[in-house]
Image (spheres, rainbow, N blue to C red):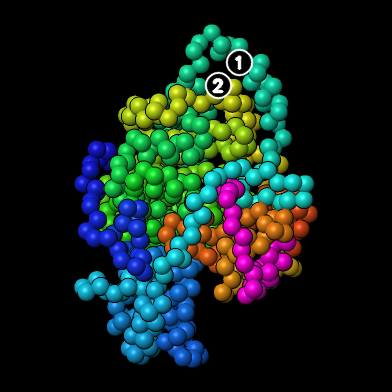
Amino acid sequence: MQELDRRHVHQCAAKVATPSIANCETVACMSPTVAAPRLATLVGDLADARPAYRALADRIRLLIADGRVVVGTRLPSERDLTTALGVSRTTVTRAYAVLRDSGYAVARQGSGTTVAIPTGEIRRGTGASLYPAEPGHDVLDLTCAATRAPSGVAEAYAAAVDELPAYLAGAGYFTLGVPEVREAIAARFTARGLPTSADEILVTSGAVAGMAILERAFLSAGDRVLIENPAYPNAAESLRRTGARLVPVPVDDTGWDTTTVTSTIATSRPRAAVLVPDFHNPTGAYMPDTQRALVGRALARQDTLTFIDETITEVRLDDGEAALPFAAHHPGAITVGSSSKSHWGGLRLGWIRARADLLTRLVDARVTIDLGAPVLEQLVLLHLLRQSPGMPADRREDLVRARGAAITALRTHLPQVDFTMPAGGLSLWLRLPEATSSARVVDAAEREGLLLAGGNRFAATGTLDRRLRLPYVLSPGQLDEAVQRLARAVTIAGHTAYRPGKRTTRPLVA
């Protein structure tokens, strides 16, 4: 891994005219491609569609809205897509013309047809201030995929307070972390199939802080960074503020298209990649070992710095053999983890696993952000890891029940919504009925006493405006009530006379 290699810093050749493919300051100019057979599979059978060109254009537009074909992607040539779909050349030609006329594609001499978004449709909701929601007694907050503390946390705090005096004689700054905590985290990696020593662990103030350290240590403005679309919004926004130029690759609840991912890596040669292979937030997708190996090799060939977010790794709800950690397939990968989802968000603790020779560089970056994580919380985490290195059993049982309740409620009250049940994680990634805007639904839901995060909050590029994240982190009864309110919101938002209100603040999404 060539840490100091700056060969990936490029200047954007030209600003993009509207309709916008991307903002050149935040999205890399080199276009990913979608192969004709892959696009044909996503589009599906057009045999009964009339007129076929209109159906093809509509289906591609929906794929763009869902994030399965990301903004900036170069579409197949008309000839290749004609062959893959088994339709006439005229059908594809007219469909591409419809996409261009409606702002969903642009054509450039020598570059083919590239996916775009009509001017004014990109809505990430980043213009208002963040705040942690403080709902009233009748408001249900599902903006955060996080749960209450599991049993044992209060006892762990009590035990940690008893142990704290032994640390009070020192300054309290552990820039690498309390040694025993680093050893416990390393032992968990080893137990999962990735031999790790404490010398490879840096304890952080959460996963977001961990990613910020990596960005400060390794990235500069203008660097290309491969990122999934949809993406965890705080991670994507942090990269934008670093000045990174995002190279999005699509992922949905069925997983990753490794052909698209590996070809994008090869053509864009990103400086870094940020991946969430374990119960991806928000889709819930889980990357199997075979795909981890393929993607890992592609990243290694390009000397791409690889940042793996394992925040939700331990939240496995179904039985089955877990994949090896991504770094077991790609030894150069740097892993970021957190106790927030497996234990409790109030601890505000996480960690970085990296080669021991990189820790000095990481500490140099870290001290410009903070000087270490709180000692008391580290001692609490140590007790929790000793009791349950992974997710506590009672937390798992609660989430299995909650997931079942959410699915039952959706099938009862909102059967027109599509989703895939994930094997783990904390949320369902809903696909709303056609022509239903999640931004409008979120606004209507708030008026019904339900706080949600729409697909646009997770869009690294594009809108994802038919998507909605539904965390199953409340009690079964509360989830049933939440889905009933959501069903009412979908109905209200579908009325042509409905006018969303203007929000000056927006809930924190986690």
User: Which of marks 1 and 2 precedes in the sequence?
Assistant: 1
Can residue 149 be seen?
yes
Task: State how many labels appear.
Answer: 2
Place of residue 353 in the rendered image (x, y in percent of width and height, measured from the top left): 42, 35
| Amino acid under disc 1 | Leu
| Amino acid under disc 2 | Val
Q: Is residue 305 above or below residue 81?
A: above
Q: Locate residue 86: give its quadrant.
A: bottom left
Quadrant of the image for the N terminus?
top left
Give the magenta-colored segment's residue range. Answer: 485-510
Badge 2: how crowded within 10 Å, few (<14), some, or many (20+)?
A: some
Which residue is located at x 74 percent, y 63 percent?
484
Q: Is residue 394 above or below residue 101?
A: above
Task: Say which residue label 2 marks.
Answer: 375
For the residues labelled 2 and 1, the Cα–Cα distance comes to 8 Å
Give the side of residue 312 with respect to residue 485, left or right.
left
Task: Say which residue label 1 marks.
Answer: 164
Place of residue 507 in the rendered image (x, y in percent of width and height, measured from the top left): 60, 48
Give the side of residue 269 with respect to residue 207, left or right.
left
Q: Residue 227, labelled with which disc?
A: none
Label 2: state its secondary structure: helix
Question: 454 or 47, which lies in front?
Answer: 454
Question: 193 or 34, which lies in front?
Answer: 34
Place of residue 413 in the rendered image (x, y in percent of width and height, measured from the top left): 74, 68
Can residue 427 be seen?
no
Badge 1: how crowded within 10 Å, few (<14), some, or many (20+)?
A: few
